[in-house]
Amino acid sequence: MASDMGSLRVGLSKVDITPRVGVELMGYGAFLNRHSKAIGDRLFARALAASDGENAVVMVSCDVVGVSAPLCQRAKQMVAAQTGVPEGSILIHSIHTHSGPNSGFGIGWGDPDPPYLELLPTRIAAAATEALAKLQPAGLRHAVVPCEGIGYDREREKRPDQLAVQDESWRPASADTTDTEAHVLRFDGAGGMLGFASYFSCHPVIGSESSAYIHGDYPGVATNWLERLHLGSVGLFMQGCHGNINTCNVHQPEQDSLLAVDVVAGRYARQIAPGLAGASAATATPVRGLRALPNLKRQELSRGKVEELLAGYLEKARRPGASDADPEVRLAMVYALGLRLELERIAAAEPYVTPVEVQALRLGDLVIVGAPFEIYHRYKRRVQAAFEQPTLVLSLCNGDWGYAPEKECYSREGNYAANMVPYLTGTRPFTPELEDDLVGALIELVREIRH
């Protein structure tokens, strides 16, 4: 047990956030009407609270694709009002499963369910307040373990052979642009393990467009399994910089995808388990939370250019013989709706900068830092290179603004992540400076919270 157990206090809790069967699932294509038909594995909001006696922080990891910024704000306000913990010390994170409900954002990628969205912030807040109420003396252990055979770089590689990836020895061609290690955190109280967290970067996209089962994909299923192996514990999955990394199994028929979820979840859990058993004591105080709001620049497209793009997409839907069942037509309408919103923003003279929340939590030498994007892996490498101490860079914190891609993506014609996804989220694309600006903001925040 860590030597600073007397000063560190930890609490963990989880609340079920599984939607009712029938809600539409989010992801994999435009207007798919992929309504859920069964629950493969339940979804949770899992909370970790920590205090050094002076400051308290809490992180909630949610088994959904991403929680919108307004819903995160509502949950944070509830927690702050009930506990006195400032909003800057409350972080809401998502694991990014595509086999869960729409969680408050996006156009055409799964209709939001108003009753579910009304309840979600309350459930997230309940997980956080319960964790804070359970604070007790604890110690932190930390390990870095090999974690391979999970994902591949979808920007640089073709989708791997789906039979080959079943072999435990399978590895991607571009291993240097994917995670090959995972961080494991273990929290022990007087009676043994209270809970744990694992940190890894890979898109949870095994549950395919043909599947209508609710589940947390490989990280949610693996975390549920690890909790069962350590009864009474609560486990969090922390999604790293996964924007360019897909699971090795992807886009398979429904039954194949359900089997593949178990295969990859088992592969991940087996590599995390040694970290739980062999983690070393780590300094876990002081505890601090900090956030900043850097202004990130958006692309300035003229009204004429936006109207030209809009006309091109509308032409696909208006040509003779067009069908609303045609995937190309459905996708064209997603972009058309996004471009119409852009025309409204131009008419309202909205500024081409957006204040975006970045947030950091500190547990002794360890810092967790994140932003509301699906961040590409190079961002993580750049941030971690600036520090000798463990620095875990998380995606999808306190909202989802779409991708944070590498700067070269912006020069690729029609690049999905850089130039198209922002319209799917109802916003406008960022500029190629996003990588340098966001990396700089994350590094500055980590330096500030450490000093």
Image (cartoon, rainbow, N blue to C red):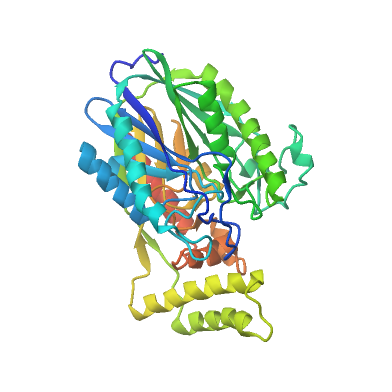
Q: Is residue 230 visible?
A: yes
Image height of 169 relative to 301, above or below: above
Which residue is rendered at x = 45% and y = 59% of the image?
Answer: 112
Which residue is rendered at x = 50% and y = 54% of the image?
Answer: 23
Q: Quadrant of the N terminus?
A: top left
Q: Is residue 449 visible?
A: no
Which residue is rendered at x = 65% and y = 36% of the image?
Answer: 262
Q: Position of residue 42 (x, y in %)?
A: 51, 39
Work out whether residue 16 or residue 333 is closer to the camera in this orientation and state it. 16
Asked where in the image residue 130 lies, by quadrant, the reply is: top left
Q: Quadrant of the C terminus?
A: top left
Asked where in the image residue 444 lies, by quadrant, the reply is: top left
Image height of 159 relative to 59, above or below: below
Work out whether residue 395 or residue 393 is closer to the camera in this orientation and state it. 395
Work out whether residue 247 or residue 118 is closer to the camera in this orientation and state it. 118
446 sits to left or right of 156: left
Which residue is rendered at x = 62% and y = 69% of the image?
Answer: 413
70 sits to left or right of 406: left
Q: Position of residue 449 (x, y in %)?
A: 32, 37
Image height of 111 relative to 398, above or below: below
Asked where in the image residue 114 lies, by quadrant, the reply is: bottom left
Image height of 99 relative to 135, above or below: below
